[in-house]
Image (spheres, rainbow, N blue to C red):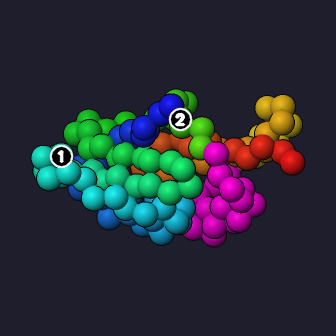
Amino acid sequence: MIHHVQLACPPRSEDLSRAFYAGVLGMVEKPKPPALAVRGGCWFTGYGIELHLGVEDDFRPARKAHPGLLWPDLDDLAARLEAAGHGVTWGDGELPGMRRFHTHDVHGNRLEFLAPLP
């Protein structure tokens, strides 16, 4: 079982992370412990997922590596992402028994969202 997934973000980008992960995805920000909060970044939880955004001074987005996140309503999420300017690339039929799409977060990190077929 996985406790969390960490993605990298550039320095001083917490407000952008909040706008995407809380604003677009609808996740809830989770307070970081004080000893870790001084490092920057932010943590989010929701839909059975915990994501940590950690600051990297020489940030480069993950373009191939990505978390695969189970999501309850892919169509609604895809519409919200596209309305916010984040392109969605569907991969239905590529993974038996699953619907899925890829997108990128506000920092350019690749994300995959999946839902089992009924």
Range of magenta residues = 70-88
Kind of residue at disc 1 = Leu
* Residue that appears at 43% across and 47% down: 51
Disc marking residue 36: 1
On whether residue 36 falls in the magenta region, the answer is no
Residue 86: x and y in percent read: 59, 58
Q: Along the horizontal axis of the image, is 61 left or right of 12?
A: right
* Residue that appears at 54% across and 61% down: 25
Kind of residue at disc 2 = His
Query: Is residue 73 something that shows in the picture?
Result: yes
Q: Secondary structure at mark 2?
A: loop
Disc marking residue 66: 2
Residue 44: x and y in percent read: 40, 55
Sort mark 2 into few (<14), some (14-19) or many (20+) by Cα contacts within 10 Å: some
Instruction: Find residue 87 and report its image quarter.
Output: bottom right
Instruction: Find residue 102 and report its image quarter.
Output: top right
